[in-house]
């Protein structure tokens, strides 16, 4: 087996004798290497051999041949490509052939591309859509693409929605993207979140970070059933969606909980809250972005593995649960993050930059925090990271389940604004007692309100 070099490839390309050169290669790996390193193809490049390679038994070679055909400027062979596409069984090769047809950017290929929209592979369909969007003003193209809004694949639907339907979206944001309503700024409301949100206008918060009540795991959270619990949280996140600005984030901290057994004759039950809640969130206009794992030291969590340590019997293994999840969602939009960022002035962007050390992975090692009044408070470090990574200075950060108010205090420390709701009066009073006098002369005063007071303020704001 002779080894070929990049220099040889360049040489063969210049002398236009590549076909013979490839023909002499027996080894598929060598052909792949040569095709990968073919680079730019000159106008007079003799590409006949590439079409022959589209019939090669090795699918990597067929795919690379199609990729190189895509670099050729002339369009004479679209029909040949289409015929080969029809015979091709490998979906990656089909995708590359469609891309090659699309790269010609020739309107005479539109009927071929329209036929390809029927392909079973959504990625192939996306390639054809992409190619057709070059002729987006062409009536025939519009008529072929628009019905794909009902395509079974979500990627296809998203592209079509963005191209043809997003103008029709209703914009309910009454304020500039960076602005919010005065009555929400640093307001804490002692009420059921769903009651309080009735008075909050659409598109008024920039970030929501929260840890919902646990399911029956602590005394403040009693629901009739797990289903009722999930449906309650669904309502909260539907409302949160309504009050969130376009393309902004929701971060939900949860973990599976265990409900202890009622007697030794029964088992305890573990509820996978993050995994069940996820479905309720994404079906209501939130797009899943990331899962961050909050990792705690083993010594800080309840010891469940003790029994197993003694008996060592399979099936009786119960690992110590040292993780919680931070599920990151974005309010679904066809706008890119760049759009959100560009709404801020240069000064705010500069001041909000996350300088120095930052967490580069989705595993955040943070010690939990214990509090004498509230049994489930956020560590400040956790809030700090979320607020710094997902908001800009001056943004309004919302926590529907505020507890001791860690999100609010951290937001204030980081020169953001906050809006909190907390149902429990003891925790509400505790938050109030922890509220510090204004640090800066122009800082927004924190207000602690009953539902009635909040409603009046909201009405006054209209
Ligand atoms: C897990 S704790 C949040 C603790 C908070 N992250 C902190 O740092 O202190 C959940 C809180 O939600 C509150 N809560 C439960 N149901 C509520 C509701 N319907 N409306 C408002 N708050 C509620 C509970 O009283 C509890 O304080």
Image (spheres, rainbow, N blue to C red):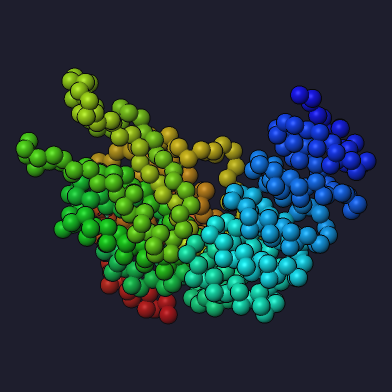
Most extreme residue toward the right, as rendered? Answer: 15
Residue 350 in picture, x, y percent from top left = 64, 52
x, y percent for residue 106: 77, 67
Of residue 459 and residue 208, the one placed in the foreground of this image is 208
Q: Position of residue 315 (x, y in %)?
A: 21, 29
Say left or right for 40 vs 219.
right
Q: Can residue 21 be seen in this snapshot?
A: yes
Indicate whether 186 appears above or below 256: below
Q: Indicate whether 133 appears above or below 364.
A: below
- Residue 306 is at least partly visible in this image: no
Question: In the image shown, does 185 or 61 lie closer to the viewer?
Answer: 61
Q: Quadrant of ligand 1?
A: bottom left
Residue 285: x and y in percent read 43, 64
State which quarter of the image contains the C terminus: bottom left
Q: Is residue 33 left or right of residue 284?
A: right
- Which residue is at 91% across, 52% downward? 44
């Amino acid at each position: 087996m002779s080894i070929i070099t990049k220099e040889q490839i360049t040489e063969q390309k210049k002398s236009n004798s590549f076909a013979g050169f490839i023909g002499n290669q027996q080894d598929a790996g060598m052909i792949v290497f040569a095709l990968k390193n073919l680079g730019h193809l000159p106008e007079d490049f003799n590409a006949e051999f590439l079409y022959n390679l589209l019939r090669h038994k090795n699918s990597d070679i067929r795919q690379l041949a199609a990729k190189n055909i895509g670099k050729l400027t002339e369009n004479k062979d679209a029909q040949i490509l289409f015929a080969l596409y029809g015979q091709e069984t490998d979906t990656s090769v089909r995708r590359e052939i469609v891309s090659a047809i699309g790269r010609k950017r020739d309107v005479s290929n539109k009927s071929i591309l329209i036929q390809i929209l029927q392909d079973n592979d959504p990625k192939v369909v996306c390639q054809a859509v992409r190619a057709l969007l070059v002729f987006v003003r062409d009536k025939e193209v519009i008529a072929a693409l628009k019905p794909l809004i009902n395509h079974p694949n979500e990627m296809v639907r998203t592209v079509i929605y963005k191209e043809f339907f997003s103008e029709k979206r209703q914009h309910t944001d009454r304020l500039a993207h960076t602005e919010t309503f005065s009555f929400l700024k640093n307001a804490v409301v002692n009420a059921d979140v769903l009651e309080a949100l009735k008075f909050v206008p659409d598109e008024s918060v920039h970030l929501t970070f929260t840890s919902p009540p646990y399911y029956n795991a602590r005394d403040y959270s009693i629901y009739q059933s797990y289903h009722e619990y999930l449906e309650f949280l669904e309502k909260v996140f539907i409302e949160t969606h309504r009050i969130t600005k376009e393309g902004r984030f929701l971060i939900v901290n949860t973990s599976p909980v265990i409900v202890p057994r009622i007697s030794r004759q029964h088992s305890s039950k573990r509820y996978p809250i993050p995994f069940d809640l996820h479905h309720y969130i994404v079906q209501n206009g939130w797009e899943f972005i990331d899962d961050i794992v909050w990792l705690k030291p083993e010594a800080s969590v309840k010891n469940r593995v003790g029994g197993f340590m003694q008996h060592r019997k399979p099936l009786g293994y119960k690992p110590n649960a040292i993780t919680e999840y931070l599920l990151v969602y974005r309010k679904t939009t066809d706008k890119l993050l760049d759009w959100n960022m560009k709404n801020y002035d240069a000064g705010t962007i500069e001041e909000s930059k996350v300088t120095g050390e930052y967490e580069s992975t989705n595993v955040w090692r943070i010690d939990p925090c214990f509090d004498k009044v509230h049994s489930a408070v956020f560590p400040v470090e956790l809030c700090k990271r979320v607020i710094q990574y997902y908001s800009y200075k001056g943004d309004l950060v919302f926590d529907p389940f505020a507890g001791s108010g860690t999100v609010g205090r951290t937001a204030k420390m980081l020169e953001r604004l906050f809006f909190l709701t907390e149902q429990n009066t003891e925790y509400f009073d505790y938050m109030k007692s922890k509220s510090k006098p204004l640090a800066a002369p122009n800082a927004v005063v924190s207000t602690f309100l009953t539902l009635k007071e909040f409603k009046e303020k909201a009405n006054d704001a209209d």
